Image (cartoon, rainbow, N blue to C red):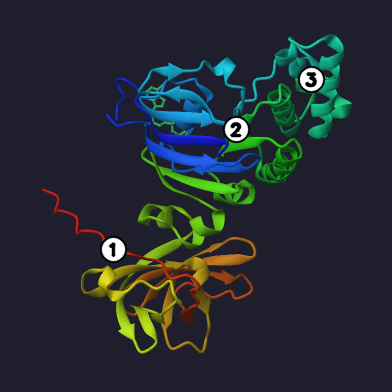
Amino acid sequence: MFLALEQVGLYYPGAATGRRAVDGVSFGLARGQIGVLIGPSGCGKTSLLRSIAGLERLSSGRIRIDGELLADAASGLHTPPEARRVGMVFQDYALFPHLSVADNIGFGLRHLSRGQRQERIHQVLDLVGLAHAAKRAPHQLSGGQQQRVALARALAPAPRLLLLDEPFSSLDVDLREHLSQELRGILQESGTTALFVTHDQAEAFALGDRVGVMHQGRLEQWDESYAVYHRPATRFVADFIGHGVFAPAKVVQGPGGPVVQTPLGELSEAGECPLPEAYPDGECEVLLRADDIVHDDDAPVKAQIERKIFRGAEFLYTLRLVSGERLVAHVPSHHDHHVGEWIGIRAHVDHVVTFRRPEPQAAQP
Ligand SMILES: Nc1ncnc2c1ncn2[C@@H]1O[C@H](COP(=O)(O)OP(=O)(O)OP(=O)(O)O)[C@@H](O)[C@H]1O
């Protein structure tokens, strides 16, 4: 693997939580790939990025880039940031206001001759589509253009790894979507391996060859986006990604193999369904995502609409079954039902995802 982390841990002395900000994180990223880290606020995404950049010393574990050991807590090895050939792009793009776009980009290229420097500046400006703006001052550019200059500046010294920490979070949604697609093209064209931090799932799925979900310093899953969505490794990942609920279910042996009995009928999946022995008495929970619930007037199972949120092409309905179970469903927005109405639903689940039922919480004193 081009970027390889082994059991990386980071502890800030005096941390309010008393926990490690990064805890036993291992993953690998192949050359030229884009990895994306997502997770709730405070889960350790930025701390992990800072550890890779060399801005923090590891409390445990090792980091290698292209086979070169850059940090090893056991031996005390800590290669300084400037010797790692790692570029960073932050949310606040922090361009020098008094320098032109070209000089901002040239700032990290002072070791090159004047001619080489000019050539590289034009190359990266071309790459980000801003060749016409070389002489402008940052304040003469839009937010999106300034962020592209920041990207060009980070790419100019040809880092072997680029780290991006929520680079688009201060931009509006449309521009963000556009830039993240553009970024994928730019990184691929320049052959740059990159690790990107975001809290936006759509951005993570659109950008990442690999997506990592973090929770309380730990990396709960590191996988292709499809697997993170359809095969969540832990209950936390299942809960964090997409809209869904956990419904009580039971795995039993059916005539054609194991099936999962759910409030919406039996579900099965060839080769992937858990065996009844996987859970005590087969009792488990099944993940029912909003995309898995289909509105069908002829379905025998009825549910009452408790709440609905208009999301453009679809509504997100919160539904309640006669048994009291709650579900969420995406329904195309031309089916406009009223809150309180009963509609027919069925489950259309391609991937059956089950988890052990959580232990009952101890009663509060
Ligand atoms: N310099 C520091 N000193 C002490 N604790 C810190 C420091 N930086 C971060 N932390 C703590 O480490 C944990 C992880 O923070 P981090 O900023 O890495 O999370 P994050 O996932 O990037 O969050 P966000 O999405 O809000 O930026 C948090 O509990 C945070 O309070």
Q: Of residues 91 and 3, which is closer to you in this image?
A: 3
Callout 1 touching callout 3 (CB < 8 Å): no
Residue under label 2, please give it: 164
In whole angstroms, how far apart are the C-alphas of marks 1 and 2?
36 Å
User: Which corner quadrant of the image does residue 121 belong to?
Assistant: top right
The numbered disc on residue 356 is 1
Which label's residue is closer to the chain start, 3 or 2? 3
In whole angstroms, how far apart are the C-alphas of marks 1 and 3?
55 Å
Amino acid tagged 1 = Arg
In percent of width and height, residue 363 lies at 14, 54
In percent of width and height, residue 348 lies at 50, 77
Q: Of residues 283 and 166, which is closer to you in this image?
A: 283
Decide if residue 164 is on the left or right side of residue 69. Answer: right
Amino acid tagged 2 = Leu
Q: How many numbered markers are drawn?
A: 3
Element type where label 2 sits in the image: strand
Which label's residue is closer to the chain start, 1 or 3? 3
In whole angstroms, how far apart are the C-alphas of marks 3 and 2?
20 Å
Give the image quadrant in which the ligand numbered 1 is located. Answer: top left
The numbered disc on residue 101 is 3
